Image (cartoon, helix red, strand yellow):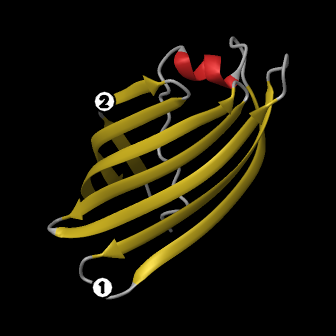
Amino acid sequence: MTVNNYAVGPEAQLYLGNLTLYGQASVGQLTISDFHGDQWGVRAVARYFVRKNLRLDAELDFNRTDYDGTNEDVVGAAIQAMYRFDETPWAVFGRYEFERRKFETSTQDLRANKVVIGLRASFGSDSLFDEDRNGATMDTYRPASVINTK
């Protein structure tokens, strides 16, 4: 079985003091063997810097896949806190994600909750704030659930 998924689209960031508003839109296609689904999605993220190395995030996502006239909608939301240790590239973070998948032909939906705690290294920036304000984010949606391809 061959699985391919691609998406293309623009992203934009708006800086308002300690607040960054980030948006994404995409179109693409999901292919599983001979099966094809057209996709589109939008994503909005707000990042607030309490201090230069303490960032709080809130995120909303919507993605739709059209399987020959039947839609699957995925709505997601996430919150995250990240702290980078001063004078180091190391940051710790905690993230909670909620996701709801619904096929228009079904009365039921699938829901997923995900908690992630991690350690991250960033090189070439002095702080989380500096990293945010220099260069594109190029961050993508991280689904809380996985498509079963077997």
Judging by the rendered image, the residue that carries numbered circle 1 is: 106
Q: Quadrant of the N terminus?
A: bottom left
Front residue of this view, candidates 33 and 96: 96
Percent from the top left, x then y, of residue 37?
A: 26, 57
Front residue of this view, candidates 20 and 147: 20
Query: Could you tell me which secondary element the residue under label 2 belongs to?
Result: loop
Q: Is residue 36 left or right of residue 14?
A: left
Q: Is residue 83 left or right of residue 147?
A: right
Q: What's the amino acid at mark 2?
A: Pro
Judging by the rendered image, the residue that carries numbered circle 2 is: 10
Q: Residue at x 72, y 22 (%)?
A: 122
Front residue of this view, candidates 126 and 105: 126
Q: Residue at x 76, y 36 (%)?
A: 83
Give the farthest residue toward the bottom.
107
Badge 2 crowding class, 10 Å Cα cut-off, few under 14, some 14 to 19, many 20 or more, is: few
Instruction: Give the distance between the C-alpha atoms of the residues marked 2 and 1, in whole angstroms.
Output: 32 Å
Percent from the top left, x then y, of residue 104?
A: 25, 77
Is tag 2's residue or tag 1's residue first in the polypeptide sequence?
2
Q: Is residue 108 left or right of residue 78?
A: left
* Residue 71, placed above or below residue 132: below
Percent from the top left, x then y, of residue 5?
A: 38, 46
Query: Could you tell me which secondary element the residue under label 1 belongs to?
Result: loop
Q: What's the amino acid at mark 1?
A: Ser
Q: Residue at x 45, y 26 (%)?
A: 16
Which mark is nearer the camera, 2 or 1? 2
Q: Is residue 106 visible?
A: yes
* Residue 100, placed above or below residue 65: below
Give the farthest residue toward the left.
69
